[in-house]
Amino acid sequence: MVKKADIPKAGLAAALKLAATVGWRDASMRDIAEEAGVTLARLHEAYRSKGAILDAFVGQIDATVLAGDSPELAAESTKDRLFDVMMRRFDALRPHREAVGSIVAAAATDPRAALGGACRLVGSMRWMLEAAGVGGAGVAGGLRAKALAAIHADVMRIWLKDDSEDMDRTMAALDKRLSQAETAMERLCGLARSRRGGEGAPAGEASA
């Protein structure tokens, strides 16, 4: 008999196990309840939907990443801080690779699930930005979170197939995408500065 306090944990573990074996799309809430050893009514008290289970899973991964926060990172560059945080995230996801792959594949054929997953990921990336010491709040933080979510999704395609012990391919892909984002941001900032400078200069000087 699973204790009431342990039902959320048991339900999540059962859902991930089924995602990795029978597939996330085909696993029903009843299947999850039976795998967890609880009644459907008890599972319903903990999770009202499979989406709620995914919310709990993402929250668990976020918590694991945030628990690994280190004051020493403050001295690193923004790119290096983001690299460290995102690699911690892929490390945390690693034991659940098959389940994650199944969840991603299911979302690819279900627009509603894909939208929910995108919103869930952007919310998670706000926390990753905060962990890296980069503002994740407000409109600007939302734009950064969306950009980081795009990087995460792109690198995850590599990660899902990366069976190397040190995740070399994942690290290389993440480093490349973060470098590209850093370069793009520098160019945008440079363009903004040049425009501000041109606005205050005489017409002849601005066009010189």
Image (cartoon, helix red, strand yellow):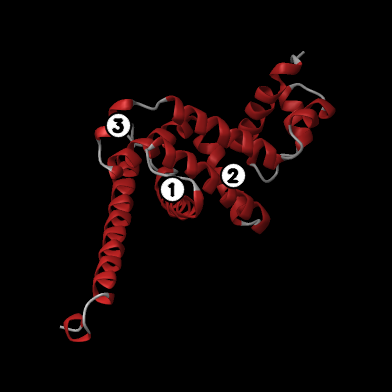
Instruction: Name the disc covering residue 43, or none.
Output: none
Viewer-nearest of discs 3 and 2: 3
Viewport quadrant of the N terminus: top right
Please state which amino acid type lies under the numbered disc 2: Ile
Mark 2, Cα crowd under 10 Å, few <14 / some 14-19 / many 20+, is many
* Label 3 – label 2 distance at C-alpha: 32 Å
In the image, 47: left or right of 167?
A: right
Q: Position of residue 42 (x, y in %)?
A: 81, 25
- Up/down of 184 relative to 35, above or below: below
Viewer-nearest of discs 1 and 2: 1
Q: Which residue is mark 1?
A: 152
What's the residue at 53%, 37% (across, down)? Answer: 98
In the image, 9: left or right of 93?
A: right
Q: Which residue is mark 2?
A: 103
In the image, 208: left or right of 82?
A: left
- Mark 2 or mark 1, which is nearer the start of the sequence? 2
Q: Which residue is mark 3?
A: 73
- Mark 2 or mark 3, which is nearer the start of the sequence? 3
- Up/down of 38 relative to 20, above or below: above
